[in-house]
């Protein structure tokens, strides 16, 4: 097998907790190889002739563009499927959609609301299914985040990440991802906006096995103190627009300001999965400042997802 590759042929990519630390490290190595070759102008096309069906029930910029561009760069084709334009939007059962698409395409990426819908799709599909985002998990983003931290810090083991904000899909994926990558995690949320309890229990098991630390607090300063990375996300995600005003009040004091960031390590990284609302979850001086790596992070969605596509749909580099 070529250097940097990892063979996950036929596997689904739904949740980071479905993989071993060694498998996730293999994906990071493959992503680094693919990025290096892309920057050098070298064509790597192990997915020539293959098609990825992309189901979108939530709007997207980075997910759609990165998967579509990634498939083209790998020699394949990506097919955009909006729920408004498919029978899913008219109530076709997920098992029927899964069985039919499996006869047309070589892989399926879905970005939707319910995580159970994605699991059901994967249960009935006979091709790999990739979770492009659900309300419970966003594993592709955290894989790209880990790649970015590794590039800037030179290591993942022992890195402490402070997540400040809503206990949403990003926080959930960080909870399971951090121990698998050997990182420590502190999550600060307002009371009533904590992470999913089932995810927390699973994360604590993974952390105990990995010898890493996870802490859940309600004080942003406690989470940020000495942290190597500060991470945040929007306070009202897609589907929560009606709660916006209530959430703005609940999250007062949880914005990542210059004053809050001053409690982190002097060489901290600031990260955000985007889109961002400057003046709400993060101050412009922080997200546009020298510690911010948000655009490296956004770019790495492309390279990390190409690694997932190659590993699950090709298994090795051509």
Image (tube, grey):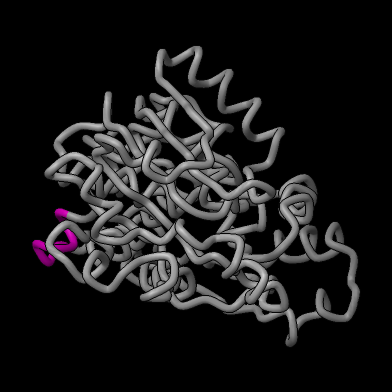
Between residues 52 and 284, which one lies in front from this camera angle?
284
Query: Is residue 283 visible in this depiction of the protein?
Result: yes
When the figure is inspected, residue 275 is found, relative to residue 172, above or below; the finding is below
Residue 196, how many percent across, how many down? 68, 41
* Residue stretch in magenta: 36-42
Q: Is residue 38 magenta?
A: yes
In the displayed structure image, the side of residue 42 where residue 100 appears, left or right: right
Q: Is residue 161 magenta?
A: no
Between residues 230 and 152, which one lies in front from this camera angle?
230
Point 77% across, 45% down: residue: 123
Point 31% across, 33% down: residue: 160
Residue 189, how many percent across, how many down? 54, 47
Point 53% across, 21% down: residue: 206
Quarter of the image for residue 53 reads bottom right
Between residues 234 and 100, which one lies in front from this camera angle?
234
Farthest residue, direction left:
40
Quarter of the image for residue 199 reads top right
Quarter of the image for residue 162 reads top left
Residue 277, how many percent across, how many down? 42, 75
């Amino acid at each position: 097998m070529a250097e940097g590759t990892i063979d996950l042929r036929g596997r689904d990519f739904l949740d980071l907790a479905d993989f071993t630390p060694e498998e996730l490290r293999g994906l990071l190595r493959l992503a680094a190889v693919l990025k290096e070759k892309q920057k050098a102008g070298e064509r790597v096309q192990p997915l020539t002739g293959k098609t990825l069906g992309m189901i979108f029930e939530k709007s997207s910029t980075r997910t759609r563009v990165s998967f579509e561009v990634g498939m083209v760069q790998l020699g394949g084709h990506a097919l955009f499927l909006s729920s408004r334009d498919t029978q899913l939007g008219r109530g076709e059962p997920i098992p029927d959609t899964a069985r039919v698409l499996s006869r047309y395409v070589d892989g399926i990426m879905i970005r939707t609301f319910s995580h159970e819908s994605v699991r059901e799709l994967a249960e009935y599909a006979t091709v790999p299914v990739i979770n492009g985002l659900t309300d419970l998990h966003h594993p592709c983003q955290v894989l790209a985040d880990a790649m970015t931290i590794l590039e800037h810090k030179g290591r993942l083991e022992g890195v402490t990440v402070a997540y400040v904000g809503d206990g949403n899909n990003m926080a959930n994926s960080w909870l399971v991802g951090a121990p698998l990558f050997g990182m420590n995690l502190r999550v600060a949320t307002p009371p009533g906006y904590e992470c999913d309890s089932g995810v927390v229990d699973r994360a604590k098991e993974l952390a105990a096995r990995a010898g890493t630390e996870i802490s859940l607090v309600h004080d942003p300063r406690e989470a940020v103190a000495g942290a190597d990375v500060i991470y945040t996300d929007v306070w009202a995600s897609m589907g929560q627009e009606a709660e916006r005003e209530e959430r703005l009040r609940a999250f007062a004091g949880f914005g990542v300001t210059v004053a809050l960031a001053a409690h982190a390590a002097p060489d901290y990284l600031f990260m955000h999965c985007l889109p961002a609302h400057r003046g709400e979850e993060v101050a412009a001086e922080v997200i546009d400042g020298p510690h911010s790596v948000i655009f490296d992070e956004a770019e790495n969605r492309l390279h990390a997802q190409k690694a997932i596509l190659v590993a699950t749909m090709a298994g090795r580099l051509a």
